[in-house]
Amino acid sequence: MDSTIKHRNSEQTFTFVTPPADAPIEVLNDFYWTTDAEPHALRRKLILAKYPEVRKLTGYEPKTKWYVLLVVLLQLSVASYLRNTPILSWKFITLAYVLGATANQAIFLAIHELSHNLLFKKPLHNKLFAIFTNIPIGIPYSASFQPYHQLHHKYQGDEYLDTDLPTRFEAIVMSNLLGKVFFATCQIFFYALRPMFITQIKFTYIHLLNVVHQIGFDYLWVNIFGWNSFAYFIMSSFLAGSLHPCAGHFIAEHYVLSENNKPRSEIPVPPETYSYYGSLNLVTWNVGYHNEHHDFPYVAWTKLPELRRIAAEFYDPLPEVKSWCGVIWSFIFDDVNTLWNRVKRKGKEKHGHKIDNLDKNQDA
């Protein structure tokens, strides 16, 4: 069997390198490897050629900052309210799961919007507001997220630069029921710790400011409201990236699941990105419009539904996710869904110049 298989759809020719059907299990248990460029740049070019008015949708959304401010104040209020409540009480845990995790997921994704400079006109203002937005997370996060997320967009699927991808070690160890339960429960740790083991980014004054500001805030908060109140922030952040409905987007966005996943002995031509158009977009800044976001990362969350409406014939044929809760369930309990189910591209051994250039652009 030829190990290189080509497939043409309406937008692009995909070339996947696949093993033969009788290959050993060590070979069949592998990622989807492709030699083609990621699909979003091509679709963006095609959409702009047909609908040049889409360019008018790009740009920051000034009203977002007021919504973010309300979410931050909500978290500060609930944390203050729980300052004398035992951490392991039903009241504390329920509020942390229902309100805290939902709010902190919104804060994670507000920082995502800020990483694309979609709240303010000047990049520096977005960085500084992201540091403020970071407060209820409890640990410094915003400054590191931006450069890593920019790499995810610029080099989607690159085995070295796209740190959204699971490593081979993760896939080997956790592509079983218990492993997937652990992964889905502790996703937040994988997304926080994995990048530093794969790709190093330049430490800038924004990182330092993020660390100093967050530690200073945490110190003052603990001294005023106590450790239980601070624990609410940490528990909210953990639950936001755990078995929570909104956390389903982490898996839903780029994992090739269920009917989209094909045995490695067949012709694998899975899409790399999946959108979700359900009600949870209301509390996650429309992050479910993920194909649209990757096609046009500088279109703010409020304009993504309009983008989809204008370019409907490009997005309607793409497979979509119906339920983030359903994604978590099927990821864990369906044997066909594992951490191997991601599309990867071979990266060059050294990307340091690209990362340095990216950091310089982000400091502009």
Image (spheres, rainbow, N blue to C red):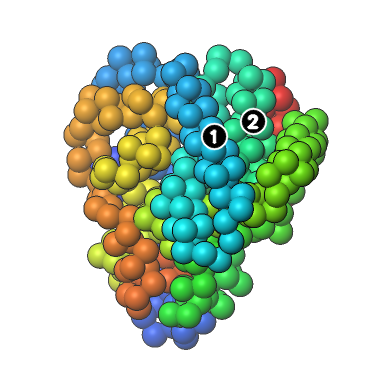
Q: Are marks 1 and 2 in contact (CB under 8 Å)?
A: yes
Given residues 143 and 73, the one toward you in this image is 73
Image disc number at residue 214 = none
Residue underneath mark 1: 72
Residue 224 at x, y percent in the picture: 72, 41
**Relative horizontal placement of residue 348, taking residue 96 as reference (left or right):** right
**Relative horizontal placement of residue 285, taking residue 235 as reference (left or right):** left
**Relative horizontal placement of residue 262, taking residue 153 as reference (left or right):** left
Task: Between label 1 and label 2, give the one nearer the viewer.
Answer: 1
Given residues 213 and 289, the one toward you in this image is 213
Image disc number at residue 132 = 2
Type of amino acid at the residue the image marks with label 2: Phe
Residue at 40% from the left image edge and 35% from the top image edge: 285
Type of amino acid at the residue the image marks with label 1: Val
Residue 69 at x, y percent in the picture: 52, 27
Question: For residue 15, which quarter of the picture?
Answer: bottom left
Residue 207 at x, y percent in the picture: 75, 36
Q: CA distance from mark 1 to mark 2?
A: 9 Å
Residue at 64% from the left image edge and 58% from the top image edge: 194
Given residues 38 and 341, the one toward you in this image is 341
Residue at 50% from the left image edge and 23% from the top image edge: 65
Residue at 22% from the left image edge and 28% from the top image edge: 309
In the rendered image, the vertical position of residue 8 relative to residue 133, given as above or below:
below
**Relative horizontal placement of residue 105, taking residue 227 as reference (left or right):** left
| On-image quarter of the N terminus | bottom left
In the rendered image, the vertical position of residue 39 relative to residue 245, given as above or below:
above
Instruction: Please tell me which of labels 1 and 2 falls first in the chain.
Output: 1
In the rendered image, the vertical position of residue 108 relative to residue 173, given as above or below:
above
